[in-house]
Amino acid sequence: MKNLFTLLGLLVLSAPLLAQDMHCGTDGVMKAIYDKNPHLLQKKMAEDKKTQALQAKLIPNSTYVIPVVFHILHMDGPENISDDQVKDGLRILNRDFAKKNPDTTEIIPAFKNLADSMKIQFVLATKDPLGNCTNGIKHYYDPDTDWDENSPSLYSHTWDPTKYMNVYIVRKIIFNSGFGAAGYTYFPGTWPIGDSHDAIVVLNNYFGSIGTGSNFLSRVLTHEVGHWLDLYHVFGGTNGAGIDCSGDDYVNDTPTSLGYLNCPNPSVPSQYQICTPGVSENFQNYMDYSYCCRMFTPGQGQRMQLALQNNISGRDNLVSNANLVATGVINPNGDCVPIADFKFSRVKTCVGTAVTFTDASWNGQPTSYSWTFAGGTPASSTASVVTVTYNNAGNYSVIHSSSNSAGNSTPIGKANLIQVVSNTAQFSAPWSEGFENLSQLNTNWTTYSSSGSTKWEQSSDASYSGTYSAKLDASDNTRKNLTALVSPMVNVSAISNPHFTFKLAAAEVTTNHINNLKVSASIDCGDTWTVIYDKTGQNLVTTSKNNSDFVPLKSDWRTEIMSLQQIASATSATFKFEYKRDTIPAANNIYIDDINILTSTSLNDVNADENNIQIYPVPATDELNVLQKLKNPQDVTFTLRDLMGRELMTSTNYMEAGEQKKTMNLNQPAGIYFIHIKWEEGNYSQKLVISGQ
Ligand SMILES: [Zn+2]
């Protein structure tokens, strides 16, 4: 595939494994299907022989026209690409299929006369399956924008594939194998006629040349439509590019090819005459993986046209005159009534800080707009883009509608969409939160769930200390669901060397879950966030897998400690726990308790239990003993500080693995001190009373 490899060239430097695989997933998904259903492969091979025999006899159709619908799946991010980007992607597809791409001038002499127009044209549908007005571009808020082959709800938007070519535009494509793909589809005949899987999937940033797209990465759809119309890679369908010459694409005018993961030098034939001495290979074909693809051949055109004459997947119906009328390609509808939607620059903001709202209506091009901003300035607007400020803390709703000559959209309301908070800190460090006060989680804290279902809640099911903790219930198993718990504002600058600690208890149902917990800090009321903690899967869980409803024992809790050095001077900081379920089957419960923001010298007791540290006697007199279990032999540093944090004595000792004892001669007047212990895997502080001798 063209251009993918321009990106690959960059990626290889940092992530060779990812880069290697970032092209087309079609062979991978087809192989998985053939492995399970070998008879399908037999059927396909028989079909391919028939097709090849027919190719030479085919008289090309004047031009086939295919109705197209694009399904944009998004979660309110940049993956919700504009209709202009979709139209640009469609323009590139039609340009390449009609051989109107200007880079045909770069085709090497051996193939110059072989580059051909495919006489196949793609046109946006203007009637949906029910005959309603559409512009052929649909936008859906749908977590399947992270397109994961494990998700049971993929392809849920497909329109009858015997009437429309369906193209899904998504944010990610995730295969169990870890193989990364920019797009994929299935060959005709893979699925029963009319099956929703008979569709093409492409990443939004590999589509079109504007918006999130780019010229370099814009030809994935050209390649995938080739597969969808029965073209193999020029190096064959059962082999990767660059491996050997055994593959066949069943096209008579494309020479046997090794397949190219990068672009050979056109002036060095030995770089692309590998399989047959003296015979150049068509590394510039759209169905290769090289980044310099420029052409299809007449033989490929014949094969694609035969696919459109074949009823094996109902492709013959697509191009029928009756279907072109039914889908509004012939006698198209005019502009449709818009379906209102909008984008927003942020959902949490400080009093007085602007939020930008942008119309994102679809289905029809709006010519006028209407907004109502509860609590905002302005309170209403008729512009397409509006900047709004809020003067008081609170949660505010937005209502939007749009219209054009075809009619008015149904207004869309998003209740409590914008959370405006005072940028005056409610609390000052040292600060702690044990979730003991019922009103606090509801008032001081904000909870959020992308699925709108279960959120973090105060729970008496388990706690590290006191009676309550914050719990996210396992019954919320919406895949990809993102749940957030956001703290009140805290003045971190009130203490020196601030640290953030919390207790965590997390178990999963199986050991291969990849759920993720992040903690982030914001010093601008939640506009931008800095990640201070990020653990996934087995790094996150605090105990072994648990098939029942997880309620932690005391020993199941773990202490997490992060320095807040980066935001030490913040007079107003907020903290966000974000838990993302990426789990099949069901996840289990997760708990948080005893959040502290404190100075490093008073990390009292925060991690004593799991480090198996014992300090005695308490109170101490002239001698102090520290017992500690070490995983590995290493240096351990013991430091005694006074209440002001001043270092009174320190010593570093090499200690063996296992339980080790250190005895310190204190020689200090009676008073309150801190003992701090630092080793490779962690550190620990405890308040220490010295009673005098
Ligand atoms: Zn491919």
Image (cartoon, grey):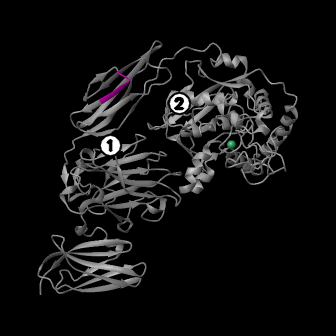
> What's the magenta bit mostly, secondary-structure-wise?
strand
Q: Nearer the viewer, mark 2 or mark 1?
A: 2
- Residue carrying label 1: 527
Q: Amino acid at mark 1?
A: Asp
Locate residue 126 relative to residue 501 in the image: left or right.
right
Q: Which residues are magenta?
A: 383-387
Give the structural element (helix, strand or loop) at label 2. Answer: helix
Above or below 241: residue 601? below
- Tell whether position 385 is magenta: yes
At a point 66% along the width and 16% down the height, the residue shown is 325
Locate residue 455 relative to residue 243 in the image: left or right.
left
**The C terminus - image quarter:** bottom left
**The N terminus - image quarter:** top right
- Residue carrying label 2: 85
Above or below 133: residue 15? below
Image spot of residue 537 (x, y percent): 48, 59
Depth check, front residue: 352 or 148? 352
Image spot of residue 213 (x, y percent): 53, 37
Image spot of residue 601 (x, y percent): 23, 69
Locate residue 188 relative to residue 457 in the image: left or right.
right
Image spot of residue 304 (x, y percent): 76, 32
Whichever of callouts 2 and 1 sits on the residue coming sooner in the sequence is 2
- Tell whether position 424 is magenta: no
At a point 71% along the width and 41% down the height, the residue shown is 284
